[in-house]
Image (cartoon, rainbow, N blue to C red):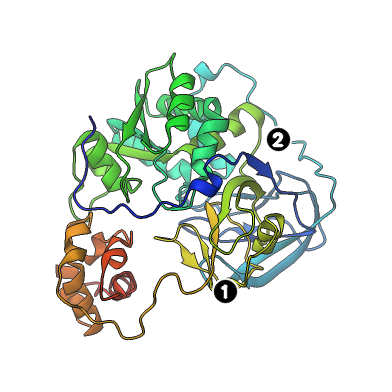
Amino acid sequence: MAFSFKGGIHPDYNKERTYASPIEVLPPTEEMYLPLSQHIGAPCIPTVKPGDKVKMGQIIADNPVAMACPIHSPVSGTFKGVIQHWHPSGTRQPTMVIENDGLDTVDETLHPYEGDLDDLTPADIIQFARESGTVGMGGAAFPLHVKLKTAFDKKIETIIINGSECEPFITADHRAMVEYPSTIINGVKLIMKCLNKDTAVVAIESNKPDAIAAMSKAAEDSDIRICELPTKYPQGGEKQLIKAITGREIPPGKLPMDIGCAVFNVDTCASLFRYVSKGRPLTKRVCTVSGSAVNSPANLLVRIGTPYYALFDYCNGFIEDPYKIISGGPMMGTAQHALETPVVKNTSALLAFCGDEEGFEENPTCIRCGKCIEVCPMRLLPTYIYQYALAEEFAECKKLNVTDCIECGCCSYVCPGKLHLVQAMRMAKGNIPKS
């Protein structure tokens, strides 16, 4: 039986409306919007000029620095230029606009690897990861080639593939594991080959029995183990997942690779294999559209750069005007300002809610119950950090290890006083003294 981790919660998962919904293909819009910042690291720089014709899959932006990966055009058409446009972060950022010609003419330079996959070297796989434009698709958007290179250099001991998908409402990874498990498993094998490891563990929560069955069958002739984990939020957090699988704990200020572990999302693995086997870079991803305001929730295969309104229109719009729209899950996602905002590489879900379902309080009061401390999976003291953050005593927040907060929202979820705990953590982390 797998280990568990301290803290965590069991929210209403609300996955029922899309749990069994097959992935549907969303047609592209007439204009596609590609933010130049879609990953952790340096933003990309356009490699085409306004008025240039582009083809589907063509690299249209890149940056030669190490912490970057290219952006590929999701359609064929004309590059119209760079504008300031809404970004999922809630800010306006430089964004490339592609006018879709509707032809989907594929870039002729794209082609699958024609040799024997067994002959690939770690350097080959790392290079393919970069060329594909693949980033961590579970939310972090860390460039895959950088993660593979770092893991190779550190000679990690344990590869963990994250299929937990513990956030409420989201079923994108679930459907991916059910519908194309072999693609995921083959991607895992590439990562194993890159890191010179004979084994890997795929972690899936117990509330996804069909995904466990599909992945187990796809992995039956390999040394990839499918590990069924108890359902608990935030099981999908890297540190919690490592604790559950290996029993190891990551010390404050350290990373998974510092204790010999590397964690990859299931759809990240699939994206790598698609590029190697079919020559298809990351231009599409699965996105769950759900929430109480959505008429017909669905799991959609969406081209990166598609405006949010197109996803909601496909799902027959809203039951009523939404009170809040969130990119990502309800626990860790980001509230959105505009439906013109586009899907980016790490957009796993788009949620719309009726009414004030979060129960926002303008002037919340701490009643000193300690529930936030009980559920914190990082063993922090949220209520104390909150008080120091409000007093702008950020050095004290640092002493209480606020930088270890993963912003999972467990503390805010259980707080009877409805304190704005996660917001306080973010504020404190952004104001930590450098010295």
Across and down, in percent, residue 425 comes to 29, 70
Residue occupying the point 43% across, 16% down: 220
| Res 193 seen here | yes
Tell me the element at label 1: loop
Q: Quadrant of the N terminus?
A: top left
Instruction: Find residue 306 and report its image quarter.
Output: bottom right
Q: Is residue 335 left or right of residue 370?
A: right
- Note whether 302 is above or below 212 in the view shown: below
Residue occupying the point 33% across, 49% down: 237
Q: Amino acid at mark 1?
A: His
Q: Is residue 122 left or right of residue 391?
A: right
Instruction: Find residue 219 and report its image quarter.
Output: top left
The residue tagged 2 is: 110
Number of residues whose C-alpha sits closer than 10 Å to that of mark 2, classed few (under 14), some (14–19) or many (20 or more): some
Gap in Å between the C-alphas at discs 1 and 2? 36 Å
The residue tagged 1 is: 337
| Res 33 seen here | no
- Note whether 288 is above or below 355 in the view shown: above
Q: Quadrant of the C terminus?
A: bottom left
Depth check: 321 or 6 in front?
321
Depth check: 15 or 340 in front?
15
Residue occupying the point 43% across, 44% down: 146
Q: Is residue 287 left or right of residue 191?
A: right
Depth check: 259 or 363 in front?
363
Tell me the element at label 2: loop
Query: Which badge, 1 or 2, comes first in the chain's sequence?
Result: 2
